[in-house]
Amino acid sequence: MSQIVVGYDGSACGDAALSAALDLAGTLGDKVVVVFGYAPPGLWGGEIAEHEEAIEELGEKVMAQAQAQAGERGVEIEEKLVPKRAAEALIDVASERDARMIVVGSFGEPPLKGMILGSTPNKLLYMSERPVLVVPASK
């Protein structure tokens, strides 16, 4: 059984990506690994621990939403909270699991804006050694 790694953050993009990954898993018979990547801000100081705790709490809440969506469709998922930036977290988990693909959502921003701002889908398309499916968010 192969695995599909999906980036999920509770946004409309994340919902679109999770829905697509669950559909594909049902069709292909794959397992779904839902990844919430987070990284502390670049600042050093006392706020970092508090920030990490808040992000981890958000990650747990988001994973409960993913679990509910998967449960409604009768699909079992594995959850991974990874303390790295989203693209790096997804690539690392996909590599560890020898995943079939990575699935992420997108708001459909122009490529130039994505390159300048560093969107996760754009980074994955350039950095990943495995297939990346970018799913547009529902409007």
Image (spheres, rainbow, N blue to C red):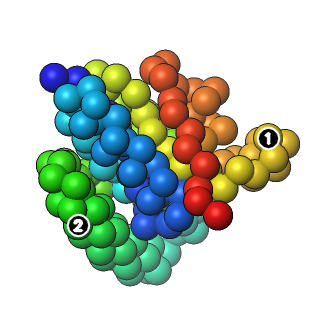
Amino acid bearing label 2: Ala
Quadrant where the C terminus lies?
A: bottom right
Q: How many labels does the image show?
A: 2
In this view, the residue in front, 8 or 69, is: 69
62 w.r.t. 96: above or below: below
User: 33 left or right of 76?
Assistant: right
Q: In the rendered image, which residue does mark 1 sit on?
A: 111
Amino acid bearing label 1: Pro
Q: Residues within 10 Å of mark 1 (few under 14, many from 20)?
A: few
* Helix, strand or loop under label 2: helix
Q: Residue at x 43, y 34 (%)?
A: 102
Q: Residue at x 34, y 50 (%)?
A: 35
Q: In the rendered image, which residue does mark 2 sit on?
A: 68
Mark 1–mark 2 distance (CA, rounded to whole Å): 33 Å
Of callouts 1 and 2, the N-terminal one: 2
* Helix, strand or loop under label 1: helix
Q: Residue at x 29, y 56 (%)?
A: 81
In this view, the residue in front, 106 or 119, is: 106
